Image (cartoon, coloured by chain):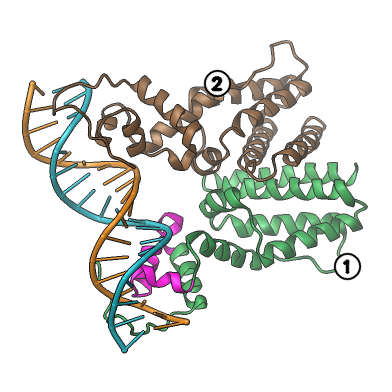
Chain colours: A green, B brown, C orange, D cyan
Amino acid sequence: MTTVPPARSPGQRAGLTHERVLAAARELLSEAGVDGLSMRSLARCLQVSPNALYSHVENKLALIDEVLDDLLAEVEVPPAGADPAAGLHQLMASTYRTLIAHPELVSVYLMRQGARGANAQRLGDAVTGLLARAGVAGAPAREALRVLIVYTIGFAAFAPRDDRELTGSFDAGLRWLLAGIVSS
Amino acid sequence: MTTVPPARSPGQRAGLTHERVLAAARELLSEAGVDGLSMRSLARCLQVSPNALYSHVENKLALIDEVLDDLLAEVEVPPAGADPAAGLHQLMASTYRTLIAHPELVSVYLMRQGARGANAQRLGDAVTGLLARAGVAGAPAREALRVLIVYTIGFAAFAPRDDRELTGSFDAGLRWLLAGIVSS
DNA sequence: ACCTGAACACCGTTCAAGT
DNA sequence: ACCTGAACACCGTTCAAGT
């Protein structure tokens, strides 16, 4: 690995932005995986010295937090008038499909610190709304939400192993959970 | 962190054993957590140089694999004559209680590479046996096994967040899953 | 405010010795 | 066979500069 030194003297701008750093992180993640995404490798991609990143990002954890929440933007939320039970299944299945693109990211970061970004909030609200229309509210709804979230994230984290059969199992288990939730 | 140099010249034995290395790894894990368990910190505990460990352990991944399987030895398998449905619930609940002792270990290692040790095998066989006695065999049994395993490990990996409510939710979701499994 | 240089305190792992 | 010394190729992060 040749360490190309930045062709800039101290004080000269590199044109870095919070947005550009995030975009590069997403790109590096999909090219090199979660183990290839480090502050130093990211700096290499952007042709800056490693510490330059800290002008646009608090630290690695905060960066990955944002990358993860960006990922959740792709999840399809069912339209307002959709059938609640079917909508819940669609929403969780879409979340699963989105997350299995980066299972390692899910297991190492989502599992260890959770998602608290805007998109995560939006999905949580959507699930809660669907549950309410299915007749589940209050404490049981919060419990159902937790079960659905942990179940889906857990399966997504397992994805690198045996994708094919795992997705089928995810679907079967999800049906059992939803049957239990709406009939309680 | 003072780096105490090993008081040994090259060629002198330190009395290391595979068993002693593993025991020290378990101890260091429960004292310093998964982030505090490194090959170098482990070597420090054992008063040897870092590379000495590689005479007794293939690498860090293999070491943690064994530590994880050791952990699973604590899981209580229900007696042979137990009620299948109740036995399945007990077995998964015991697995959950065992794993939440080290949620980070679960999320980083169990999720990313799975468990293939002797104890993991033993638990898988136990679940399969209980499923068979509950009338579930063949492909549906393998699917049920996958769902139960991923569900339980997923919840265990989430444990560092809100322990109290999470355990209740784990139980509720587990009941829903088992109801779906035995009635299919 | 945004960047570099240099440094701090780490990693996992390998290779060539020494007994 | 089991260990040390030294090294390789990395980490995340901080602090003092420079413009």
**Residue A172 visible to the viewer:** yes
Q: How many marks?
A: 2
> Is label 2 in a helix, a strand or a loop?
helix
Which residue is identified by label 1? A81
Residue D18 drawn above or below residue B157? below
In the rendered image, the quadrant that contains the N terminus of chain B is: top left
Q: Chain of mark 2?
A: B
Q: Which residues are magenta?
A: A31-56
Give coordinates of residue B78: x percent, y percent: 69, 16
- Looking at the rendered structure, the kind of residue marked 2 is Ala
Give coordinates of residue A129: x percent, y percent: 85, 60
Is residue A46 located in the magenta-colored stretch of the structure? Answer: yes
Q: Chain of mark 1?
A: A
Characterize the magenta stretch by its predominant secondary structure. Answer: helix
Residue D4 appears in which quarter of the rendering? top left
Residue A75 appears in which quarter of the rendering? bottom right
Residue B77 drawn above or below residue A8? above
**Residue A1 visible to the viewer:** no
Which disc, if any, is residue A145?
none
Distance from disc 2 to disc 1, alpha carbons, whole Å, reads 50 Å
Q: Residue at x 58, y 21 (%)?
A: B74
Which disc, if any, is residue B73?
2
Is residue A72 located in the magenta-colored stretch of the structure? Answer: no
What is the crowding at mark 1: few (fewer than 14 residues within 10 Å), some, or many (at least 20)? Answer: few
Q: Nearer the viewer, residue A98 or B21?
A: B21
- Looking at the rendered structure, the kind of residue marked 1 is Gly
Q: Nearer the viewer, residue B55 or A73?
A: B55
